[in-house]
Image: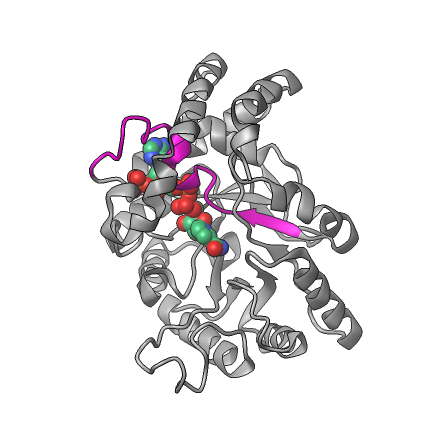
Amino acid sequence: MQYRHLGRSGLRVSTLSLGSWVTYHNQVDASQAVEMLAAAHDAGVNFFDNAEAYALGKSEEIMGAALKKLGWPRLNYIVSTKFFWGLDRSAPAERAVNRRDTLNRKYLMQAIDGSLKRFGLEHIDLVYCHRPDPSTPIEETVRAMNDMIVAGKALYWGTSEWPAEAIHAAWHAADRHGWHKPLMEQPQYHLFHRKRVEEEYALLYRDMGLGLTTWSPLASGLLSGKYRAGIPSGSRGAMENMAFLREGLTNPARNAAVELLAPIAAELGGSLAQLAIAWAARNQNVSTVITGASSVSQVQGNLGAMALVDKLTPEVLARIDAATLALAD
Ligand SMILES: NC(=O)c1ccc[n+]([C@@H]2O[C@H](COP(=O)([O-])OP(=O)(O)OC[C@H]3O[C@@H](n4cnc5c(N)ncnc54)[C@H](OP(=O)(O)O)[C@@H]3O)[C@@H](O)[C@H]2O)c1
């Protein structure tokens, strides 16, 4: 494993990390979570990603219980959570004090306390605003994120899927008021989804020292090659609540492009999944690539991607681009 600074901070994250979206509670119980976290930790992973919304809080509970069981020193691992959608879906949206999707102060200050309780931790290392909320003044959100840090409940804060101009506005609001600035953004980044990371955010790395913790390096599994012959049973694409992903996972042009990547992966001595993960990790603006897995063997296989990163020469990258770039957004 290699380690990179999270943006312009002193915190070093493993270049590959592990997330819990979809999997925890739906596919992975607490004892499997212990095994998967242990396998990742054995391979050098020090960052585990989570969110309040994942399995409506159950994912945080499972990770918290697993971390307790593993008993690692708190200094040795980094956990995250994210806020935006909230957990209470009972009140009709129009009558709720909070909109259900919000970054207002009332929601955020309650949300961090709920996450700490579910994790059973005294602080969360990284907290994210899971989506932008243009209906809340940016100062209100930035101040609430700052106050979580000042209260010792979180250590660093960032954004997820925010447009560059909104990150810019948040950074400058914090700068004006002397509040903690957003340090990292969590965008989708894989061979078929590149522009935001490679173009839209380009100035933010240099001007603000923005770090990236990128998500879905396999495009939910598409880049592992498993959807070339349709949707395998037991896969994410077969899950009822993931039906919205099916059209993308079975896209014929993208699956044909994945087919073209197979000989490249084989020449480099790796799997398709390892090639795709290594491709994301080769970008030095990426602090960590958050991988996803539904089994210990996927965790172990995917973390082997580190061996391919240095094999991605300009010539190899050009061949990968020839297969995928025209299909990327
Ligand atoms: N900030 C955000 O808005 C956001 C959004 C999405 C994700 N994330 C974070 O990013 C993490 C990673 O995202 P992701 O789970 O979508 O990552 P991904 O790497 O694109 O997809 C992971 C899924 O692909 C399948 N898979 C993984 N390795 C495989 C292999 N070697 N062979 C075959 N299939 C394999 C598994 O699903 P099956 O085995 O079930 O098919 C696994 O759960 C999440 O856990 C979460 O922490 C953040």
Estimate the x, y position of residue 181 in percent, counting from the top left: 69, 66
**Vertical position of residue 18 compared to residue 300: above or below:** below
* Residue placed most toward the observer, 74 or 321: 321
Percent from the top left, x then y, of residue 51? 43, 61
Quadrant of res 117: bottom left
**Residue 219 colored magenta?**
yes
Q: Going by the image, does 316 lie left or right of 292?
A: right
Q: How many marks?
A: 0
Q: Which residues are magenta?
A: 211-233
Choose top left, top right, bottom left or bottom right for residue 313: top right
Residue 100 magenta-highlighted? no
Q: Note whether 53 is above or below 237 in the view shown.
A: below
Residue beneath the point at 65% across and 74% down: 138
- Identify the residue shown where x is 73% and y is 72%: 173
Q: Residue at x 55, y 53 (%)?
A: 186
Q: Quadrant of residue 249?
A: top left
Is residue 46 visible in the rendered structure shown here? yes
On the rendered structure, is 153 left or right of 37? right
Say if residue 301 shows up in the picture: no
